Image: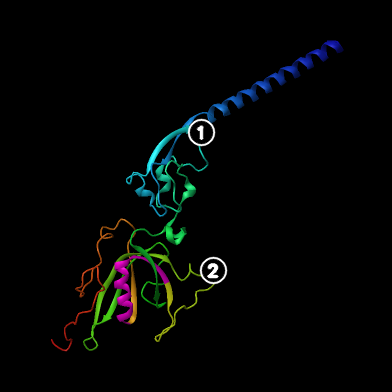
Amino acid sequence: MNYTLRNLVVAALLMLLGIVAVISFIRGERQDLARGKQEVQVFIAAKDIPAGTPADELESGGFLDTKDVLREDAPPNAVGKLKTLDGLVSNDPIVKGDFVTYTAFDKTAGLKPTAQIKGNERLFTVPMKPSSNVAGLVRAGDHVDIFAGLNSGAGNQVLETVVARDVEIIETPETLQPDGAEVTPAAPDAEGDTVLYVLKATDREWLNIQFALSNSDDYGLLFGLRPASGDAETKLPPVYGAFTEPTDAPIKAQPGPDPSVR
C-alpha cells in the first residue's frame, strides 16, 4: 500500500467515525425530546385549599382534580401521587386551578402558627413544672391527655380528673429556645420554676384547662402521652370525672366524700 492510498483509508475511517458520532448525538437528542413530550398526570386544586389543610383530607374534601400535561410543562415538584404527601399539611393557601406541589406542604411542627389551626382551634401557652410526669418527654407533634388534681373546697380534698383529651403539643421548651440555647425557666411561681408549652386546643377545652390551672393542687397539670395516631379513643370527647358542667362552660369542682367517713 503506497503512501497516498494509506492516507485515503485513514481519512475514510475518520469520516465514518464522525458520521457515527453525529448520528448517535441526533438519536439521543430525539429520544430526550420524545421523553419531554410525554404526558404526565398531576394534581391541581379543584377549589381553593386553605393553609393548614391536612393532605389526607384533600381527596375526601373535593380539593383535587387531575390534569394531563407535557412532562416539560409540569412545574418542578408537581404532585403526581398523594402517597408522597402522607402526614403533611398545606403551609400556604393554594388557589383554584394552581398545580399542587410538594413545596406547598410541610410537617405540622414546621408550619407558621396560623397554618396549624382552623375553626375554633386556638394556640395557648401553658406553664408546666419541669418534673411534671412525662412533660419532659413529649415532643412537638405528640398528643397528650391533660390531668389535674383540683382542690374541691371541702377541707383538703383533691379531685383527680381528666381535663382534656388528645391535645396536640405544638411547641416544647426546647423548640421555643434559639438553636443551641439551653432551656431556662420562664414563669417562676411560689412553688418553683415552670417552663412553657404551646398547646393546640379548642376554645372550650381551653376553658377547662384554664380552670384547672387556677384551681389545681401543688402538682399543677400533668401530661399523659397518648399512643400513636390510630388509637380508637383519639376522637372521644374529654372525660370530666367528678365535674358536672356541660362542655360549653368552664368546669367546676364538686365536693367529694369526706375521707374520714368509712
Is residue 211 shown in magenta?
A: yes
Q: Quadrant of the C terminus?
A: bottom left
Residue 260 x %, y %: 16, 89
Tell me the SS state at disc 1.
Answer: helix
In this rendering, does residue 137 appear at all?
no
Residue 107 x %, y %: 44, 55
- Tag 2 and tag 1, C-beta contact below 8 Å: no
Classify 112 as above or below 251. above
Comparing 66 with 238, the one in front is 66
Span highlighted in magenta in the image: 197-217
Q: Which residue sits at x=44%, y=51%?
A: 93
Is residue 254 shown in magenta?
A: no
| Image quadrant assignment for residue 229 | bottom left
Comparing 2 with 157, the one in front is 157
| Image quadrant assignment for residue 1 | top right
In this rendering, does residue 257 appear at all?
yes
Residue count near mark 1 (Cα–Cα under 10 Å), binned few <14, some 14–19, many ≥20 = some
Residue for badge 2: 178
Residue 114 x %, y %: 43, 60
Residue for badge 1: 71
- Amino acid type at mark 1: Arg
**Mark before the other along the chain sequence, 2 or 1:** 1
- Amino acid type at mark 2: Pro
